[in-house]
Image (cartoon, grey):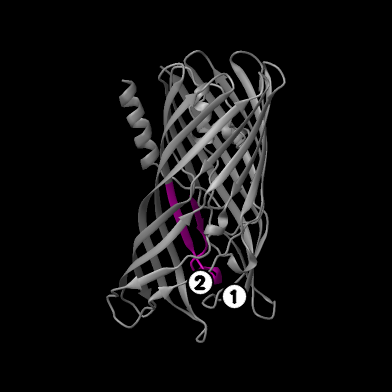
Amino acid sequence: MNKNFLALGLAAALLAPQVAGAEGFAINEWSAEGVAMGGARMFAEDDAANVAYNPASITKVKGEVMKSSYTYLSPHGNYKLYDGAGKEIEDGKNVVHAGWAVGSYYVRQINDKEWFGIGAFPRFAMVSEFERASKASTNAFFSKLNGVSVTPTYAHKFDKKWSAAVGAEINYVGLELQKNSYHPVAQMNVGATQTEGESYALGWNAAANYAFDDKNEIGVVYRSRIKHSLEADFKMYPASGGKITADAYGVVTLPDSWDIGYNHKFDKKTRLELKATRTNWSTYDALNISLSNPSVPGVLPSNVDSAKTWSNGWRYTIGLEHNFSDKYAAMAGFAFDEASIPYNGGDFMVPTGLRRTYSIGARYNDKKQTVAVALGWMDVGNLDFAGHATDAYKSAHAYDSFTKIASISYQRKF
């Protein structure tokens, strides 16, 4: 029965829509408790979601545990567009296109020294949508990156102070991009394009924890970069009618990252976590797509290039957890993400600046089951970015952007 339950949980995670709102590519909402603590969830006791937050901490799980988590994200935002003289030519807002971040986890203690865990959760995903008749649509009117990582993990507890883990990562991405083709000389849309494809690639991760004493602990997690070679279908629907198809190919490199965390227990009821995440976004230097074998020769360009040149950035989080009793607990958290998108590398795929996330949550648990809920509000911030040669504007300003977050998790011990 345990194996069937695990298989169903992982299948649900793989088949569910693994997308998130306008907060950038990186997804950190892997459980309700993690959402409640702002992502500072590296040292939780008896939590199967440690597979995602800190694989070395699956050594804190006793016995056999399975967990599922569902997080709802709803993005909202406004923008203004300007011409070459700095005159405003359009204002609008995004189409609210909510998404889900779904996670399933399983951890089993093999003996006093060894643990096995596996998780299926999104590390990178996004979705954004704008009105198809807007000038913003010449840059992008629909962008979606579905993503899920499956991470089989082995962890070893060396003694009371040291534990470590190593794991593989099977990463899937499904990319869909839609935009209007704009002719800068004629100053008109000449048709709509759609690029759609998917890819699987491999990565790895490693983690280690060290406990100074019963109250203080540190940990570090490294996740490798993952290079996807994306084969896609390209379609163009000219304004004059008909359809042109072509084969598309592109390379997308998901960045590597470091997590560094500190855990302090004030007493048996209250603890505080601090966490810093370094993400090497500079791997996202361009989104270039090559086209070949068009159904109508000589009409489409051989390359569609878009420079990004994102910069590396930090995410800082703080989380507090307080147990009122053996069954009830409350959590709160705050996260701050640095802006990584430069003026010349921004677009309507991910129109976000620096991010501040405020969150709260509660948990109930007994000997067999745990239920947690969380609410969060993300201030996505403002972003100014330049238009491209084929955009119907010269510069853009995204502002008053935010994302609503709600999450629920259920865990069962066997």
Residue 295, disc: none
Quarter holding the N terminus? top left
Q: Which structural element holds mark 2?
A: helix
**Percent position (x, y) of residue 408?**
52, 31
Whether residue 66 is situated above or below residue 258 in the rendered picture: above
**Percent position (x, y) of residue 394?**
62, 76
Q: Which residues are magenta?
A: 125-147
Q: Which structural element holds mark 1?
A: loop
Whether residue 324 is situated above or below residue 151 in the rendered picture: above
312 sits left or right of 367 in the view: right
**Percent position (x, y) of residue 166?**
46, 35
Residue 110 in sight here = yes
Q: Quadrant of residue 136?
A: bottom right
Q: Quadrant of residue 227?
A: bottom left
Say if the magenta span includes residue 356.
no
Point out the tag, 2 or 1, that comes first from the N-terminus. 2
290 vs 11, nearest the viewer:
290
125 vs 404, nearest the viewer:
125
Residue 50 in sight here = no
Q: Tell me the crowding category of disc 1: few under 14, some 14 to 19, or many 20 or more residues within 10 angstroms, Cα based.
A: many
Q: Tell me the crowding category of disc 2: few under 14, some 14 to 19, or many 20 or more residues within 10 angstroms, Cα based.
A: many
In this figure, which residue is indicated by the disc labeled 2?
A: 138
**Percent position (x, y) of residue 230?**
37, 59
Whether residue 375 is situated above or below residue 124 in the rendered picture: above
Disc 1 residue type (three-letter): Tyr
Write the residue at 52% across / 58% down: 283
Quarter holding the C terminus? top left
Residue 393, disc: 1
Report if the CB atoms under discs 2 and 1 are less than 8 Å apart.
yes
Disc 2 residue type (three-letter): Thr
20 sits left or right of 12 in the view: right
Gap between marks 2 and 1 measured at Cα: 9 Å
